[in-house]
Image (tube, rainbow, N blue to C red):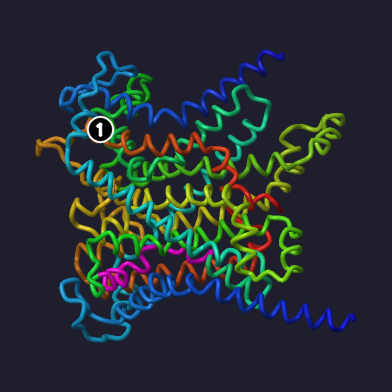
Amino acid sequence: MNSTRKKFKTKLTRERVRSAWLFMMPMFVALGIVAIYPLFNTIKYSFTDARLGDLYNYNYIGWFNYETLLFYDSWWWVSVYNTFFFSIVSVSLETVIGVIFALILNNNIPARGIVRAAILIPWAIPTIVNAKMFQWMFNQQFGVFNEILLDLHLISEPIAFLAYPDSAMASAIFVDVWKTTPFITLLTLAALQMIPAEIYESTRIDGVSPLRVFWKITLPLIKPTLVIAIIFRSLDALRVFDLLYVLTSNSRENASMSVYARQWLVDYMEVGQGSAASTLLFAFLTISTIIYLIVTRTNFDKQGVY
Amino acid sequence: MMSIKKISFFSLLIIILVYTCFPFYWAVVSALKKTGTGNFTVEYWPKQPTLENFFYVLSRPAFGSTFFNSVFVSTLTVLFCLVIALTAAYALGRIKFRGRTGLLMAILGTSMFPQVAILSGMFELTRSLGVYNTYQGLIMSYVVFSLPFTVWILTSFIRDLPMEIEEAAMVDGASSFVILFKVFLPLMWPAIATTAILAFIGAWNEFLFALTLTISPEVTTLPVYISRFRGESEHEIPWPNIMAASVLITIPLLIVVLFFQNRIVKGLTAGAVKG
């Protein structure tokens, strides 16, 4: 009796596993065509001297494109530096601000729905629109930021925020922080609401300072959520394209690795060189993600992000 | 003592609201001003609001056609991805098989990888297939990030459904196909709607592929249109017009987001805080 049931069960399991692969077939085919093939295609081009005008006649030139980037192209290293500077500063700031917002909103506040809707606004606005909106606000002559700073007598004459590489990068980080803080706030808020109220009660009786409560109790409890949020935001920031492309007008001084790779591909029409830059960015992101996952042993499968 | 605490709390709340709302408010105010950047003056409240910038943008044929393109391309991308993702998500969420975790990681990785990594390969692919600068080519490139995203979210939703509903059907000897479409699908509509909204926003906002794989306004999307917007004058950038166009393409999105905010927040946070 028992063994027949077992046999029945294994047969059923085998059948289910078979249908699982069948069910995933369309996805594999679609991703094979639109993701895997172009990826290998790009890697192939990175070893060639292909140009945009004629993608079908090219010579294989070995590691030449990579050598050029790594050893002779200082703009490549500028874009690497920009990408990291942008990502590290932006993700750190938005994490801190996002958590502070969440701590404030976690109290009993009036009109909770409206406040949460307001928090979602920056997240919902398309990045390109964001870039344009802030480009206008940063405008030297008519920008509202200059007007506010002048009115407050913090500056004596208007600043050309976007005219210099350093201030342009700072402005871009400002915009990115503005847009992505809601994501951190919402995730943190959800994590905070999972913490049972009883945990705090004992500390209230003992008169522990709120700051100490945050460091010793709240932060460790929201840490798993925060780690995932930070990983996601970092991966997103490291591939930044839209914002810098529009806000800093595709400038080389402020280019991220994504922007720089596209400049080679489209603006200079050097598909080989651009593909090498793309491949380096891809390899870097893949390797660092894998290392990170191994080191922190983050179990995405169990956590189920998003 | 209490009132000081309350006042500081409310001022913090107001700071948050100003921080999140002011930039869009400013775009609306600027769009309501008379055209001509040359005599633009900063007014925190428009003294003589006018809709002429909105009418100007709406009267441009390119705005209408790119708006349609955005709706069309995003909708088709989402529909295509949902159909393919549904069966895949069932397999990944409900059936145990070897290599499932690895596969899920790969799917998550694909949704996060930099689009520029496949840009030249995708360019060649669309050229070879003759779909460069067409809807098909654009949708094809959007599937790259939409499909893994859709699969991932649907998987985390489908995994949360209770075990029992499936077991009863399995005992009756129903095939996986029947279980998915007769048992799960009726329960999945809220999850599918949430996924569709999030995927739609992703496609609506996409810029890099649209910028690189299309050239004509008959095919390209709103973000590209906004980024290239020029007025009739060559000397000045028509900021009030640009702001009007920006507000117009953002408002449908804001309505969707505010209307479905519970759903979106759930979709964004669902799994991440289960712990």
- Which one is in front, A252 or A60? A60
Q: Main secondary structure of the magenta part?
A: helix
The answer to whether B198 appears left or right of A187 in the picture is: left
Query: In which quarter of the view is residue B168 placed?
Result: bottom right
In magenta segment, residue A296 = no
Residue A178, above or below A301 = above
Q: Check disc 1 and report its element: helix, strand or loop.
A: loop
Protein chain holding label 1: A
In magenta segment, residue B124 = yes
Q: Residue at x 83, y 36 (%)?
A: A198
Q: Residue at x 30, y 37 (%)?
A: B246
Q: Residue furthest right?
A: A1
Tell me which segment is drawn in magenta.
B108-126
Q: Residue at x 48, y 74 (%)?
A: A28
Q: Position of residue A59 (x, y in %)?
A: 22, 86
- Which one is in front, B205 or A119? B205
The answer to whether B166 appears left or right of A168 in the picture is: right
Q: Residue at x 22, y 46 (%)?
A: B65
Q: Position of residue A50 (x, y in %)?
A: 22, 78
Query: In which quarter of the view is residue B39 placed?
Result: top left
Q: Disc 1 marks which residue?
A: A140
Residue A251, above or below A121 = below
Q: Position of residue B44 (x, y in %)?
A: 34, 19
Q: Amino acid at mark 1?
A: Gln
Label total for image:
1
Residue B37, above or below A171 = above
